[in-house]
Image (tube, rainbow, N blue to C red):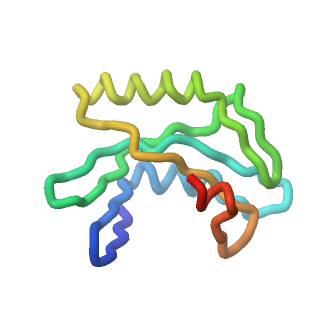
Amino acid sequence: MKQFHNIVTTVEFKDNVVNLLTEYVQNTYETPESEGVLMGKRLFDGSIIITDITKPQKSDRWGRSHFKKDGKIHQKISDKIWQNSGGYIMYLGEWHTHPEPFPSPSFIDLKG
């Protein structure tokens, strides 16, 4: 488990999520950008727990510095996670990689 804190909230990433995200680190020039959906739950104290993610799919399009996910398949996967949790695990946002050692948000990232 990884936790990140600030004065407002705590965000916790379950080990399975950390392990999956590690598979998509862009650590070589050939490694494409990756993207998916963050799934989890918000607690009454404001904390957020990331329990699941969608992974890049064969129908997604990607390159070194761009990614276009197939929204329909990621929605289908997210819906199944939600249903299997009895409605407790929900969509929390998106994740994606950057092809740089110390990523900084792009204009599109900031706009989102």
In the drawing, does residue 60 fall left or right of residue 20? right
Q: Position of residue 69 (x, y in %)?
A: 66, 35
The single residue placed furthest to the left in the displayed view is: 44
When the figure is inspected, residue 10 is found, relative to residue 42, above or below; the finding is below
Tell me the residue at 73%/44% (across/down). 67
In the drawing, does residue 44 fall left or right of residue 27? left
Q: Position of residue 34 (x, y in %)?
A: 67, 47
Q: Quadrant of residue 15?
A: bottom left
Tell me the residue at 58%/23% (across/down). 73
The single residue placed furthest to the front in the displayed view is: 111
Of the pair 99 and 21, the residue shown nearer to us = 99
Q: Position of residue 22 (x, y in %)?
A: 57, 57
Q: Quadrant of residue 99?
A: bottom right
Q: Position of residue 102 (x, y in %)?
A: 66, 75
When the figure is inspected, residue 21 is found, relative to residue 53, above or below; the finding is below
The single residue placed furthest to the right in the displayed view is: 29
